Amino acid sequence: MSYDPALAALAERSIRLITGMQTPEGAYPASPTFSAYVGYSWLRDGAFIADGASVAGQVESASRFFDWCAAVTVRRAEKIRWIVEESRAGRPPGPEHMLPARFTFAGDDGADEWWDFQLDGYGTWLWALVEHLERHGLDGERYREAAQLTAEYLLVSWERPCYDWWEEHSQHVHVSTLACIAAGLEAVARAGLVDDATVRAIGDETARLRRLVAERGTKDGHLIKWLGSTAVDGSLAAAIAPLGFTDAASDVARRTIDVLEAHLFVDGGVHRYLGDTFFGGGQWPLLTCFLGLAHLAAGDRERAEELLQHAAATATPELDLPEQVPGHLIAPGMRQAWIDRWGPVATPLLWSHAMFLRLGIALDRIDPAALAAPQTAAQEETLA
Ligand code: BGC
């Protein structure tokens, strides 16, 4: 174990942002100041933020987020039951009737137009919840109703095309979305948070899902962006780790990591996908961390360490981690148009901070005990 003192201040800043910005309701804001995200919490970002907080020893903060997810879900019980019944009857409701990707802190649907039909976050919050309960030996009884509702929702809808992690390409079925769904369903079945019939249904449906990914979500031996595609997406690293959907020791994992490195890692950072134009299509430190976690799970500690350092190097002088950096742009001509529309890149992005913590702690380069410790007044001042 060798903690890296150079990372300690960024780690402390990360945990301060995550716990300090968590709302009284338990939600984690995606980014406090970015115009298009202000006032919203995403299940996807939030689940990975809670996972980072949980690993960092912030047990109560993570639990409060999962309580918020449960409340948000149970509040929609009637709607979820309707979606499930209609879907089972062969009348799946249109995307506009499905559950949203993000909520206001109070747990309401947003009033702004958004690319809302995304299924991944519903799997990811279940996965992160069970990891958290198991990691800290907590009782999951109070999540039973929300887990049951979320599992039923996913069981009837997992095969549907929907927006991906990047809120794009809604006409496709995305492989990283499937990985999130399977990881979440398998987690709640394992933890016994759903009834017996649902455990059996999860066994059947995830077996089908895995066959589908093997047949149409894999090409040339590696995972691909969506069923039938040939390209990769940075989010696929998560299927290997931390989600564990793809066995890190498998040939598919090895090959996926190789292709992600070859196609998406450029000049110290990982792109979302070739063809990305959002803010010019820069490199995302959170994806650099996901790739690091995949390498670590597959046994390449050295490369994982390099990726951690690359991610840390994107921090601003104030120790904020951005959503993306413009070190290498795929579509430089598109950058200004996004700045004109939404302002500068989201900074800080809490999800970036969470992934930095997650990888740094997995590598034993960040000491979670030091993070959980109360701050001294002097530390409070430096980080303010
Ligand atoms: C990203 C999403 C993310 C959201 C909030 C979007 O630009 O594409 O993955 O959930 O921002 O951080």
Image (spheres, grey):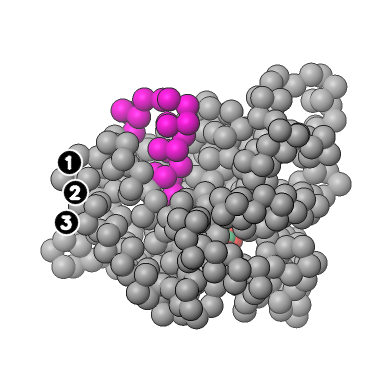
- Give the class, few, some or many, for how many residues have Cα within 10 Å of label 3's Cα (few <14, many ≥20): some
Kindly identify the amino acid type of the residue bearing the numbered disc 3: Glu
Give me the disc on residue 200. 2
Specify whether residue 44 is in view. Answer: no
- Give the class, few, some or many, for how many residues have Cα within 10 Å of label 2's Cα (few <14, many ≥20): few
Kindly identify the amino acid type of the residue bearing the numbered disc 2: Arg
Q: Position of residue 34 (x, y in %)?
A: 67, 54
Distance in Å between CA atoms under marks 2 and 1: 6 Å
Residue situated in front as seen by the camera: 332 or 135: 135
Q: Is mark 1 within 8 Å of ligand 1?
A: no
- Please give the range of residues in magenta: 123-143
Sequence order check: which comes first, mark 2 or mark 3? 3
Q: Secondary structure at mark 2?
A: helix
Proximity of marks 2 and 1: CB atoms separated by less than 8 Å:
yes
Proximity of marks 2 and 3: CB atoms separated by less than 8 Å:
no
Extreme-left residue of the structure: 89
Residue at mark 1: 196
Where is 361 relative to 78, above or below?
A: above
Q: Secondary structure at mark 3?
A: helix
Residue at mark 3: 85
Q: Nearer the viewer, mark 3 or mark 1?
A: 1
